[in-house]
Amino acid sequence: MSEKAFGSPHLAEVVPLSKLGRATRLGKVRVDPTLLTGLVLLGLVIVVAITAPLLTPYDPIEQRFTEAFLPPFSPGHILGTDNFGRDIWSRIAFSTRLDLQIGLLSVSFPFVFGSLIGIATGYLGGTLDTILMRIVDVLMAFPFLILVIAIMSILGPGLTNLYIAVGVVGWIPYARITRGETLATRHLEYVLAARTIGCSSLRIMLRHILPNVIAPALIYVFTGMVLAILTGATLSFLGLGPQPPTPEWGAMIAEGRQYLLLAWWMTTLPGLALLVVGVALSLIGDGLAERRGG
């Protein structure tokens, strides 16, 4: 790069263009308020989940009937107790582990399977694309939660069955996203060049197309985690998720609803924990989407 292009003989020496571009990109990461807020909130939630045994003074399933319905900021119970005298803070902290696990594991298989299906159908086309997309269209005609509840009613309650039910339905958005990206990519020059030199279809899909179409699906993972956590809480609320006395936010809300006027904290505080996690993941997804679009 010539010095004349900058108008000053010193600018090219002090701030090379490549370093200036990298600094600008890194600066966007540091000052992006949406992404930063989401990362901070999620980081705090993860810290609580990891250190729950150290942060909680009681066993989350230990019952103390003489201490039932203690309000928040009671001595020894910062968030109060429930109808069985169980410490609300201990139950929320240990629930954080379970709900983050539900969000992560419920998204992992749908993300991998759906992305591979979308790339395969988008690149190969033909009968495979027609059959799989018609299956997707049929499944998309039903609300996500209704399908999950229907599958859970067949398999029965439990954490493992929850993962299966969400996995059976959850791959659809990832397949649609990666298929659309693949359709826009398969005729680009680098794909045509790989095909010309004799690369197999599998190699082209995995080595050339996958790295260039996976970003939108990765961004959607955070939305998928929010949906999975909300679905898990909803199923627990209905009695189809993890069974008592396992602490889980949806189950805690269900237990406290009949005591709403007497002990509002039994439902409000688990609901706020669910809200914080949902907001954190949504902010991260929105922040990444804005950076990709920008």
Image (cartoon, rainbow, N blue to C red):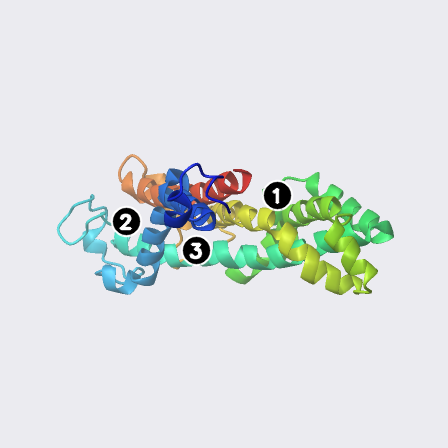
Question: Mark 1 highlights which residue?
Answer: 144
Question: Marks 2 and 3, how far apart in space?
Answer: 23 Å
- Residue placed furthest toward the left: 75
Discs 1, 2 touching: Cβ within 8 Å: no
CA distance for labels 1 and 2? 32 Å
Above or below — where is 27 with respect to 111? above
In-front residue for pair 21/9: 9
Is residue 147 visible in the rendered image? The answer is: yes
Q: Nearer the viewer, mark 3 or mark 1?
A: 3
Residue type highlighted by circle 1: Phe
Element type at mark 1:
helix
Q: Nearer the viewer, residue 112 or 57?
A: 112
In this view, the mark in front (1 or 2): 1
Residue 136 image point, x, y percent: 73, 46
Which amino acid, by three-letter code, is at mark 2?
Asp
As drawn, is 254 to the left or to the right of 153?
left
Q: Which mark is residue 133?
A: none
Badge 3 element: helix
| Residue 48 position in % (x across, y down) | 31, 56
| Residue 271 seen | no
> What residue is shown at x 40% (from left), y 39% (from top)?
8
- How far separated are the C-alphas under marks 3 and 1? 20 Å
Q: Are marks 2 and 3 in contact (CB under 8 Å)?
A: no
The extreme right residue here reads 127
Residue tagged by mark 2? Answer: 82
Q: Disc 3 designates what residue?
A: 100
Give the structural element (helix, strand or loop) at label 2: loop
Label located before the other in sequence (3 or 1): 3
